[in-house]
Amino acid sequence: MSKRIEDLTVTDNRRLAEGFFVVKVSSSAGLPEILPGQFIQILVTESPSTFLRRPLSVHDVDYGSNTISLLIQVAGAGTERLSRLGKGETVNLIYPLGNAFTMPAGGEKVLLAGGGCGMAPLLYLGRKIRDLGVEPQFALGFRNRSRILEHEQFRDLGTVHLATEDGSEGHQGFVTDIPAFRESHWDKVYCCGPEPMMKAVARLCLERDIFCEVSLENLMACGMGICLCCIVPTNTGNLCSCTDGPVFNIRNLKWQISEQK
Amino acid sequence: MADLRTKIGSLELRNPVMLASGTCGYGAELKDFIDLSKLGAIVVKGTTLEPREGNPYPRMAETASGMLNAVGLQNKGIDYFEKHIYPSLAEYDTHVIVNVNGNTVEDYIRLARRIEHLAAIPAIELNISCPNVKQGGMIFGTNPASAREVIAAVRNAYSKTLIVKLSPNVTDITEFARISEEEGAEAVSLVNTLLGMAVDPRTMKPKLSTVTGGLSGPAIKPVALRMVWQTARTVKIPVIGMGGIMNGNDALEFIMAGAAAVQIGTATFIEPRTALTAIESIDSFLSERKLDSLANIVGIINRN
């Protein structure tokens, strides 16, 4: 599948919570096929201290309006600038980048587990799974009630289980503490979130012999497999999270075995 | 269109813009964005005799107007290169140059001999300037006696075009350029990255797993340009300039300071079409000034 570099137009920028935004960008050329799990590299302008592009998960895709949604968490000057993108502004994207989640077979029971901004790729994944006639369930974890991100669109696709670390809403603890996660049998678990959360999910899935894929967010310069900075140690050596990932089967990763906390 | 041809020893390039080693993979990674046949040359990823995993993550840190890297020559080794990568490189309609690395002089010799047999590779870039490996690399390129030894040995073992890539992490880069010239190199390329580091106050740790790494990007351009200018005034062999070139104007600065060719490096990460737009803007600069060839401006600042 070929990658492209293209100027897209910002059609919407909506604040979800303190420090979280959903920016929609539209392609006048028409979108190429984008697979769930893929990401984009966005050029940040008018931010003098930002040198490199910023990699962002594809949060959702609407082929009808040729629009991609991007869920942005403000983490530094670059994402702060992106959070101020206004309607009509032009942004330059390199996309679509990376591999994709493995889609489930019909009749499989699937759980999509996300934490904080890590829920970004799970909306589009959930939509594509739903399109296959499989009803996804979601396990979403947040620090506390005030950090919960709007997830109505997830509810439209399937059951949503919530967890907060302080118990201020949903189950208290991490997504792995949600009873539905522990008590049900899952054929496939997909996960994206902070590293401790992904490791906890990976451990649980390994113990129970559940197929599990995680989407990693490593520091990268290029996103195209040329800088070799975003490497992930795997059973087959160091792989690039930008081109060999960002989605990896946990059985191929070394981290959940070597760094158990 | 102006005549953009330039010569690197016996190698003629259709224009002076090359892609720098370590920033263009093996070329194929960029095929969706650029037509490689429009380039002067590409210098593919640093290669060693044996496969290397490189340094642990994290290997990259963004800095003011640049970035640090500590990749550490991750590559699959010459056997894999020859069997799986070379056949597709041989199809490219541009010069493909291999960046050559080793721990010992013997490694460099053996690798140069292996590459000499590859008909579609007309030149090697002898890397004695990688700052991210514990053995070899910059250790050769920052000690005059070691530099002389490895350049002489490789020159003796390799008959095609030999380019030596120099380190800026020395007091006087022209000394290493002179040694390269004396030992029979046909060109020098400079600069490799500047040794640097960054600390994250939040974690109270270095940002790179190796603590130090190589700084690239516009942050180093004035330093690189000064070194290219000094070197071009010192040696007669062609100088290939690089270090923070982000566009055609930057490339023109290096050419006017004396570079017969330039390499685009870090810019490709951000804008993969940089090399092509640089070629176009060099061409339009010459046309606008009614200059018929690149040779009119190479080292022009040194002529008056």
Image (cartoon, coloured by chain):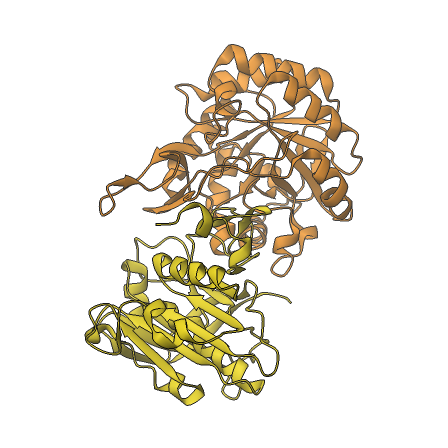
Chain colours: A yellow, B orange
Q: Position of residue A185 (x, y in %)?
A: 48, 75
Report the side of B52 relative to B13 (left or right). Answer: left
User: In the depicted view, which residue is nearer to us: B111 or B217?
Assistant: B111
Q: Quadrant of residue B46?
A: top right
Tell me which residue sits at (30%, 55%) in the image: A48
User: In the depicted view, which residue is nearer to us: B95 or B158?
Assistant: B158
**Number of marks present in the image shown:** 0
Q: Position of residue A78 (x, y in %)?
A: 32, 60
Report the side of A239 relative to B216 (left or right). Answer: right
Name the residue furthest top.
Answer: B145
Q: Quadrant of the N terminus of chain A?
A: bottom right
Tell me which residue sits at (19%, 75%) in the image: A168
Q: Quadrant of residue A158?
A: bottom left
Tell me which residue sits at (25%, 69%) in the image: A19
Q: Position of residue A246 (x, y in %)?
A: 50, 60
Is A154 situated above or below B276? below
Report the side of A208 relative to B82 (left or right). Answer: left
Is B152 situated above or below B191? above
User: In the depicted view, which residue is nearer to us: A153 or A1?
Assistant: A153
The answer to whether residue A164 is visible is yes
Tell me which residue sits at (59%, 45%) in the image: B291
Is A158 situated above or below B302? below
Is B296 situated above or below A254? above
The answer to whether residue B288 is visible is no
Q: Position of residue B25 (x, y in %)?
A: 60, 46
